[in-house]
Amino acid sequence: MTRIEQSEDNGRFHLSMRENAYDSLNEALLKSEEASDTNPIPWKYAVLHIAQTLELMFKQRLYDEYPLLLWTKLQPGTHTVTLEESIVRLKYAGIAFDSDDENRLKQTIKWRNAITHYNVDLQIEEIQTCFALLFEFLTRFQTEQYPEEPDLTDHLSPEAKTVAAHVMTFFREDTVLFDGIRMHRTWPAKLTDAQNYPSVNLNEETFNRIAYRREPHWQEHLDWVPRERCHDCSCRIGQLHGPGCCVEECPRCGGQFWFCDCNFDESELWGLTWTDDDLEQDNEAEKDHSGGRYGIYENEPTTENDDSGAKLAEDDKTLTNLAGQPR
Ligand SMILES: [Zn+2]
Ligand SMILES: [Zn+2]
């Protein structure tokens, strides 16, 4: 993760324009999470911070195009362009937005101006939708303008990333880039939530779930090189699997955790599996992409050691063949 590095020196701290943008995005997400129907005030700050993120990201892009574009009068040391001006200049640079995005940006500018200079009069539902779509816009902007760089979620703190996972559920596009991999838009939230349930119970006994590549047989084959992510749910090494993953091993019987006959006690964990709606969309996604059922690899990760990859593929296939219905 390339989180913000603050250089502190004699009581000063420095953030580059880009780091400044990512920091504002982190705050915007955390404020949006803090807001609720009974406490809507944090939305005010979420709007201010996401408007700030937009402005800084647009300015950075202009700067990357041609440094003088950052300045209103094309002279360093004068005022830098406003958010409105940066949108116009981006157009000159060949970066145009569709009318939906442009309307949403204009609305955000209005909200920000009202909050900064006048009063606050926000419709919560409207803000929620707009916020999710602005975040979607930013993730797209980052990927389109900086295709060689990590996706936007790579710049989020763990807390903000969890919020981002849930906001992505409301994206319009079916798939999202999350934590370096493309997946169905509902999957980041499920994968993130699954981390909150490290154990399950049966007959007053507690069983700790087995994280990806912490399975006992991996201890016997230390020379094997595991894939960096589970091929089915996209979790990383050491993370708990997503709900319904066919690779997760049962800590009680050693079979497939989500499909075995161990009748574990009620847990909110079981409620994380996909709804019929999710599954319908999942089937659509599976038609178009190769890869796991949930995580969709854009580039199949390669392993340095092909032989171990083959062993692993076989190992996973055996488990897949045992698949039944999720509990
Ligand atoms: Zn998995
Ligand atoms: Zn079991």
Image: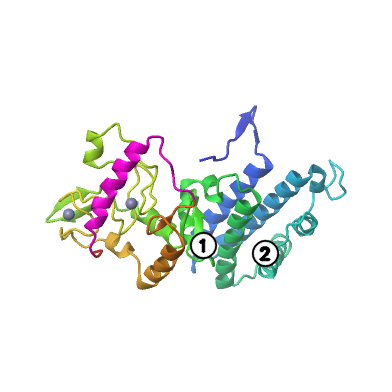
| Mark sitting on residue 35 | 1
Image coordinates for residue 194, horizontal then vertical, percent = 34, 55
Please name the predominant secondary structure of the magenta segment in the image: helix
Residues shaded magenta = 299-324
What percent of the width, then of the height, locates residue 172?
54, 67
- Toward the left, the furthest residue is 203
Secondary element type, mark 2: helix
Q: Is 99 drawn above or below residue 198 in the view shown?
A: below
Q: Give the x, y percent position of residue 322.
A: 21, 57
Q: Is residue 229 above or below residue 171?
A: above
Which of discs 1 and 2 lies nearer the camera? The answer is 2
Q: Measuring from the top left, give residue 35's x and y in whole percent.
A: 51, 62
Residue count near mark 2 (Cα–Cα under 10 Å), binned few <14, some 14–19, many ≥20: many
Magenta residue check for 93: no
Which quadrant of the figure contains the C terminus? bottom left
Which of the two labelled residues, at mark 1 and mark 2, occupies the earlier sequence position? 1
Q: Judge from the rendering whether residue 202 lies leftward or rightward of residue 192; answer left or right.
A: left
Kindly identify the residue that appears in the image at 11 percent across and 56 percent down.
203
The answer to whether residue 324 shows anywhere in this view is yes
Amino acid at the residue labelled 2: Thr
Residue under the point 84% across and 41% down: 76
Q: Horizontally, is 79 left or right of 205 in the view? A: right
